[in-house]
Amino acid sequence: MSARIVHIASNTFREAVRDRVLYNLIAFAVLLSGAAILVGQISIDIERLVVVDLGLTAVSLFGVVIAIFIGIGLVSKEIEKRTLYTVLSRPVRRWEFIVGKFFGLAGTLAVNTFFMAIGVFAALLYVAHKFSASDLMILVALYFIVLEFLIICSLALLFSSFSTPLLSAVFAFSLFIIGSFADDLRGFAMLSHGVTRWIATATAYLVPNFSAFNVISAVAHQQHIGAQLIVQNTFYALFYAAMAISGAVLIFERRNLK
Amino acid sequence: MTSRRVTFVASACLLLSLAGTVLLLHRIDEIRPRATIEDALYINSPKVVKRMSLGFDGLMACIYWTRTVQYFGHRHVLHARTYNELAPLLEITTALDPHMIPAYQFGASFLAPRPPNGAGEPIRAIELMQYGIQHNPENWQLYYDLAFVYYTELKDYQRAAAVFAQGSKIPNAHPFMKLLAAQMAEHADDYATARLLWSATYESSNEWNIRQNALEHLRSIRVDQEVGQLQDAVTRFFQSNGRLPSSLWEVAAAEHLPGIPVDPDGHPYELSAEGQVQVSQPDQFPFITKGLPPDYRPGMPTFHPEK
Amino acid sequence: MPAIEILGLEKTYMVGFWRKRPKRALQPLHLTVEEGEVFGFLGPNGAGKTTTLKMLMGLVFPSGGTARILGRTWTDPEVKAQIGFLPEQPYFYDYLTAHELLDYYGQLSGVPAKDRKRRVEEVLVRVGLTDVRGVQLRKFSKGMLQRAGIAQAILHDPKLVFFDEPMSGLDPLGRREVRDLIEQLKRDGKTVFFSTHILSDAEALCDRVAIIHKGELRGVGAVEDLTSTVQGKVEVIWQGTQIPASMKALTSDYHVSGETVRAVISENQQDAAIDALRRERMRLIAITPLRTSLEEYFVEKLQSQRTAGTTA
């Protein structure tokens, strides 16, 4: 069972690579080096701030775009192109397929982020000329970004299991935006009354809580991120991804593949 | 694994992880209570925020406004002594949307007063109002708000009168503007003027915090008046009888009152040994200036919602 | 043990904007296929062949009925290890090469790693895909893709193979090769179940056929039995281009083609026909009893239901 999941995951990874997804790293490298050099030259005393802010934001945005654009096709493309038929005629369970696809996509993003992380640290070294202890927090920020990716992948997979690629992209992207303002949404909910309050609160809790994962500003200002938050966020991401994947499995198990 | 088993396991997983996410969200929120505000103010320059909004200024203004109200309400409930972020939040909100009138009113009510009732920054409040007037010249309410600050915090009655007068000239201005201009000029210190002002504030705003604040002030004005009147009665008693009254019953009898006067909460006023009229529970009236026991230290500001 | 037992499988789709209108894709189907058979599932396009196959593969869920494959419930995942499936107009991960695709499928089918490489090579040779190392599937021609499809269906040496329109889109050479392959599979003792609307292929390959039309089974049987109905007619072929008047008196069913004439007469007119030709000094080439072709049986079955339907 787990062997099949691994095989599906590695094939998904291979597909992403051959889809030239990793070329985005080139664009990322260009962007970051350009920024680092520019900022280093004009020497405005916030070089470090700019590199960390810009670098981490770019990692986050590039990754979200990749997660969504590959994720939405994970299932729907296979159904549309009928590549799924010969896969499911083998002793592969439908749920294994979903789980394998998830790990493949998550793995792609993890590898992508790894390379980008090297880029960020390289740029940082260039402008700051040395590392400081607080730079360790950048790793935490990157870790949180990867957790965000897990959630987004699972959501893209969920939508892909029943919706067209275009709609899936719209839904996933919307949830990303709304999730980034999840704190405010809960605030809005608290200020409302009656039935609206119930609905708003329910929505606010269902939406992925990306605002808790976004510590880019804090890390750029060399703030410390508590261990408790790291642990809680990890579990939150795992639970949320599990939720979305369970949903995808339930939907896919029932789907007639015409 | 049969399909039914998969369905069962997946459903169970779905429900459990749902519970898990909700629970963890709670815990995470507890760890980061000031999250949005801290986040908001790493970028506390209105210009930068505006640029980062990528043109979605209106939406960001709404979001910042919500954060402002939450920030204040949250701290108010916690009986905070400082509201350092209130001014930046309001400045950002109004930079993003100069036409967000409620923000200016909020600033007038809560930026200017001293802690714990406000941020204690009357100058910034005035700047905020002036900025608002600049961008909304046809809005009489902003003149009201500006004059409000001059009156309540700076006690600059002349300026207040001038601003009320200016505001009254705007078409559609509320009639009380002219009234207040006149009152400012002549009876600035009157209770009637103060009552008029706070009633006007209460009427002209829809924002809960502002209205509650106005109500509290009205309650306190009533207490101040009544304490003053009672104190005068005590003085009269002393002059008539050559001694201080032993209790307010004597005063009531002397004045032919039906009973001991009670404060807005229904508690009778008290008489100290030194002949001072006092309220029995000063904490219930955060804005009174009379009737406070000598060793009274102001407690926590609270709102008493209208019954 | 029968290889396939279809016990009342049926499928009704709900169509329309509100999904309220039922559309019957397949009436309850009852069918048995024995081990070692080559079974043809015939019908025009849209008859329900692909629906049946997809239900057996677990891609579509039936509205009713069950099936057994190789003695197990058709939804049992373990069954999948022993069957192979070639869908209609297959499409594969086009960023993979044939070797990679087969290796991946081998992994999914549980072919042990040490055997996989060898088996992949063997099966590629068998389907005639040589010189494709390093070529991505997106560069394959239709015929090559079909062969790759067959390769993946037989890679793990399944006992039972399902082909959906295996000849579609192939040139005559390709079709010939596929036919040879199916014959090979039969010789290897495998059961082959394939659907097609090309009757000549079925006639040549199948032991038994089933005919399905508009979701309903119209006939099942061995090819020989279905086509052996001698109509009591005889086919007479003679050299020349003339039709003697005496022949015309016997029948109007004649046809000149090139240097010969072919006429169909009833059995009891045989002697009269021979006499007629001898009188005219025409050279008789052949007299053969007429068998219906599968096509005629097919068309007759389709039409009979239609008339039955209109009279009903």
Image (cartoon, grey):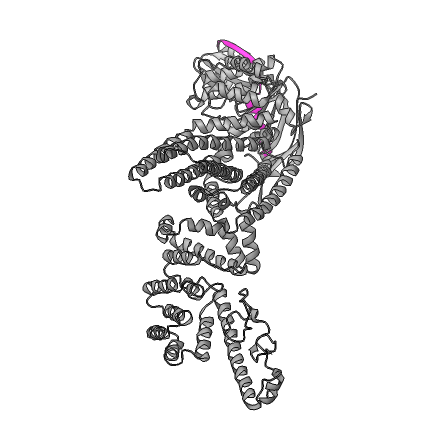
Residue C24 in the image: above or below residue B267: above
Q: Quadrant of the N terminus of chain A?
A: top right
Q: Residue shown at 42%/56% (left/top)?
A: B89
* Left or right relative to B29: residue C74: right
* Left or right relative to A257: residue A31: left
Percent coordinates x, y for residue A57 in the rendering = 41, 40
Q: Quadrant of the C terminus of chain A?
A: top right
Residue B85 in the image: above or below residue A217: below
Percent coordinates x, y for residue A167 in the rendering = 47, 42
Magenta stretch: give its range. Answer: C281-305
As drawn, which residue projects farthest toward the right? C1
Q: Determine if residue C49 is in view.
A: yes
Count the numbered circles shown: 0
* Left or right relative to B47: residue B297: right
Residue B290 in the image: above or below residue B232: above
Viewer-proximal residue among B108 and A92 = B108
As drawn, which residue projects farthest toward the bottom? B240
Viewer-proximal residue among C95 and A133 = A133
Percent coordinates x, y for residue B111 in the rendering = 43, 63
Viewer-proximal residue among B196 and A202 = B196
Q: Is residue C295 magenta?
A: yes
Quadrant in which residue C259 is drawn: top left
